[in-house]
Structure formats: C-alpha cells, structure tokens
Image: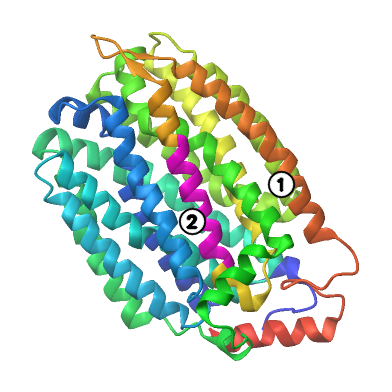
Amino acid sequence: MKNQNNLTKYVFTKYEIFLIAILAIVQFTVVLDFMVLSPLGAILMRILSISPGKFSTVVAAYALSAGAAGFIASGFADKFDRKKLLVFFYSGFVLGTLFCGIAPNYEFLLFARIFTGIFAGVMSSVSFAIITDLFPMQARGRVMGFVQMSFAVSQVLGIPVGIFLATKMGWHAPFLMIVAFSIIVLAVVIIKMKPVDKHLEIISDKNPFLHLVHTLINKRYLQGFAAMAFLAIGGFMLMPFTSAFLVNNIGISESQLPLIFMITGMFSMVTGPLVGRLSDKMGKYRLFIWGTILTMIMMVIYTNLSPTAIWIVVIINVIMFVGITARMISAGSLITGVPEPSDRGAFMSINSSIQQLAGGVSSIIGGMIISSSSTGKLNHFDTVGYIAVGVMMLSIYLMYYIHRMIKEPGIQYADETTNPEVLDDTLATSREAI
C-alpha cells in the first residue's frame, strides 16, 4: 500500500510499471519513425537527388500534418476512453509507416509522411494524458524520465540499426522494421492495457468544437502553449540536417554515423531516469534552466565545428544531448500541471499540435537558411544554431511563468490541493482506474 500522505516515496505497482514500459515502447516506435529520417538525410538527398530545402519539406510535412491532426482531435480527446484513442491512432501510425516503407519516389514519400504525421502527431498527447490521469505530479518526473527515455533507446538501438539496414538493404528497410515491431506492440496494448476512462465521469457536456475553443482561449492554457511552442522551435531547425552536417562538413563517414548515435543514446538512456528523479527532487524549472544553458553552450560549439576527430564529436554530442534530455523531461513534467482533469486530453492534443506546427515551420525556415555547395557542404548551419540559441533563451523566460502558475498560492490545480482528504480521494480513484 502506498503512503498517500508522502508522495515523495511513491511506489509503483506492477501494473503501473507495465503501463510505463508499454507507453515508453509506444513512444519509442513513434520517435524512431520521426528521428530515423534525420540520419537518413544524407542518403535520401543523394539517392532521390533532392535539395536540403526539399528534404526539410518532407520533415516539415510530417510535423505540419501532425499539428493539424492534433487540433482536430483535441475536441474529441476527452470524450473517449484514452486506451481506445491510443489503439486507433497507433494503428494509423503503423499504416502510414508502411507507406513510407514502400514509397517509390519523393512525391510518394511526401504523401506517406503526411499520412503518418496525421496519426503519430496525436500519440504523444494521448500518452501524456494517460500519465497525467494516473500519476501524481510528485511522481511524474520519474515517469516522464522513463517514457522520454524512448528518445535515447531510439538512438542506441533504432537509429544505428536503421542506418545499417539503409546502407545494406536500401532506405526503405528501417521503416519496414518499425512496422514489424509496432504490430507486436499494438497487440500487447490491445490485450494487456486496461481502459483509462475515469475522466469521462467529470467532463462537461460541451460539444467537441466548443471544447476545443474553450481550451484554446483559456488564458492559463495559452501560456503553456506558448512555452512549449518555443521549446520545439530550436531543435527542429537543426535536427533534419545533423547527419548531412556530420558527413559533409565534419568529415564523418556514413558508416560511422551509427556509432555516434549509439554512444550518444547510451549516455541518454542512463541520464534520462536520473534526470527524471532529479527534476522531482530539485525542482523542474531549476533543472530546465541548467539543461537549457548546457544545451546552448554545446550547440554553439557543435554548429561551428570544422573537420574534427570522431571522438571529439561524440563527446560534444553526448554533453549536448544530456542538456536536451534535461530540458525535455523537466518541461514535459512541468506542463502536465497546467490543465484541469476535464481538459487534459484537449490540452495535451493542442499542445502537441502547436509544438508540431512550430517545429514544422522552423524546419522550413532552417531549410531556407541552409544551402549546400557543389561538394555537399552545408552553408549557414552556424547561423541556424545562433537562432536556436536565441529561441532557447526566450523559452527560459516563458517557462518561468508556467513555474509560477503551478506554484501560485490560493488556486486549486488538477494535481495539487491543500486538502489532504481530497488528495487521498484523488489518489485512491487513480489506483482504482489502473
């Protein structure tokens, strides 16, 4: 039995551990599908004979379609059992990834990424809504640390294997690998996961459109949307071009790319859970500040690299991703305290959509700034790095208001209350739900 009056010693049940694991695996497949395209950039631009601008369009198409889908789904996000939503959108994601795996040309790949984004864009919001429904704020840092570890695992296992398959069997192979694994994951979700529907007992009778509008115009929520939008912009500007930069500017061979991503991911796998615990212990906003400062310093160094020894590149990459991990986990945990229970699904969907849209636009802007020479070398990559750093500085300012909002006295939030009896009832309801 958990000690409900001391949430700092929250002990997870066996089912909660399973739930965290399956959500992390679901996120792993979705993240891998998105992230594998970036290291394949150098290969795709060569095989499909496309420019950096066209490649950034493929990346942006996914993000923009994901953003649009999130807005559409947000009005319905709190109207259904969250497990059913997870199964529906995950099934569409698998189908879209299959389309990527059979794409014969650039145009079909562009269509496939749009289709995949429509479903994948809602996945993270559904997962985070489930986490917010079932786990108290004081334990979410640890939960988010494990779920967000999917980014690291995708680097350790998925991306190196994906690049290896792409070089040996063609660029379609990584997507087909994701499809095969995702089908197994989908079956486990359908069979083993319990319904997540307690929120249906407290939502209002607003129709989906009004629910969307009321969530969008809520002043409290608007601050959260703005903060998370700027959180996404910096990374999206650089991410699509990292592999091309490593190969064409720094002199790393395509065969060495898996090693860089694997070592970086291994360190991220270790630091992810540690960062999650640290965010619960030292404070999420304080950790966000330190993670952002570290990321900014390393990003300036990284984007100004010239031909460099691979071991130096690995060290810089590892330190930069430690900072990125700290930012994402602390910010993701902090933002879950913003919405009320009846708005969680809608808030998370809109929040995910805004991040995707902001990321898609920033990817296009990055593609417009960056150009390639006749030798394939990327120009103005450092300029995009400086812009990303400026955006990160602004995100510190915006996240400060979220931090103050969650801590503001005299307001009862979805996750915290000064009444111990209400708190105990809330936790008991969560335990019954799972």
Q: Residue at x 17, y 25 (%)?
A: 46
Q: Residue at x 47, y 48 (%)?
A: 357
Residue annotated with mark 1: 399
Q: Amino acid at mark 1?
A: Met
Residue 88 x/y as whole percent: 33, 74
Q: Is residue 334 visible?
A: no
Residue 288 x/y as whole percent: 68, 43
Residue range in magenta is: 347-362
Q: Secondary structure at mark 2?
A: helix
Residue 341 x/y as whole percent: 65, 76
Q: Is residue 131 above or below residue 385?
A: below
389 left or right, relative to 370: right
Would you say residue 360 sits in the magenta stretch?
Answer: yes
Residue annotated with mark 2: 353
Q: Is residue 166 above or below residue 366?
A: below
79 left or right, relative to 259: right
Q: Main secondary structure of the magenta part?
A: helix
Q: Residue at x 17, y 42 (%)?
A: 107
